[in-house]
Amino acid sequence: MIRIAAVGDVHLGEDAQGRLRPALEHVSERADVLLLAGDLTRHGTPAEARIVAHEFHDLGLPVYAVLGNHDYHSDAVDEVTEILFGESGIRVLEGNGAVLPVNGQTVGIAGAKGFGGGFEGRCASAFGEPEMKKFVGHTQEVADRLRSALEALDVDVRVALMHYAPIPDTLHGEPFEIYPFLGAYQLGEAVDEAETALALHGHAHRGCEHGVTPGGVRVRNVAQPVIRSAYALYDLE
């Protein structure tokens, strides 16, 4: 049994020190790894990153993360990433993966922020203005990085970690008009093609928790406003 704890969209600001810590103290007794699905900060500042590092420091289990759109806002991604790892050991994944042994098995976690674009039948296409081509091109580039990271994992179990949604199922509750800004079908294709066991994302605060890709992979929206807890727990056989 592999036990995964996950949460996203905690949006910690400089006034949030100590907010999550009490609920995280015993997470290592319930899970083998903790995954953070982006939007860890409010505005992506180094000061906010230090709050995140403090909240998730020394929990007694490995912690991996992807960043979200809020974490990119201040154009300080490199510094935020360095603070999270240097001060707390949180490893930020972006187009790469990590392998850890759990109960005699190997678990591979591949991460990428993802991007928008929409879902089949209602999606943007790389046609027309250079700006539109660039938008869709970035979505495809990120999805390709996620696919490569997943396929490179020589493990028993693969888990995909994103901020943006790979399917529309977990967006139910959000206005249809903003679906293209919440995720993209290319991410779901990457998850399916790599024989992934579980895909996690955040970003959709008014969405729902449970969904499944066209290929049958379980998808879970772990945005904190959705799971209404410090983290959700998922077991993989």
Image (cartoon, rainbow, N blue to C red):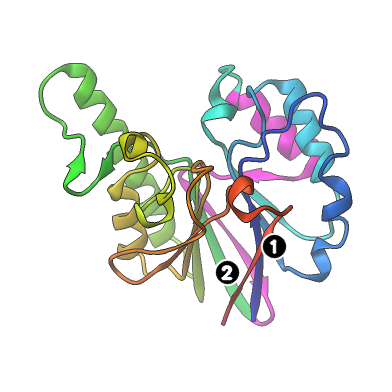
Q: Quadrant of the N terminus?
A: bottom right
- Give x and y (percent) for residue 58: 86, 51
Secondary structure at badge 2 equals strand
- Give x and y (percent) for residue 51: 80, 32
Residue at 81 percent of width and 65 percent of height: 28
- In the shown orientation, is residue 30 left or right of residue 37? right
Give the labeled residue for mark 2. Answer: 107
Of the residues tagged 1 and 2, which is closer to the observer?
1
State whether residue 180 is above or below residue 98.
above
Q: Amino acid at mark 2?
A: Val
- In the shown orientation, is residue 161 left or right of residue 231? left
Q: Quadrant of the C terminus?
A: bottom right
Mark found first going from the N terminus, 1 or 2: 1
Q: Give the numbered dot on residue 33.
A: 1
- In magenta segment, residue 202: no
Q: Nearer the viewer, residue 70 or 157?
A: 70
Q: Which residues are magenta?
A: 77-104
Q: Give the numbered dot on residue 128.
A: none
Query: CA gap, disc 1 to disc 2?
Result: 10 Å
Label 1 environment density (alpha carbons within 10 Å; few <14, some 14–19, many ≥20): many
Q: Amino acid at mark 1?
A: Val
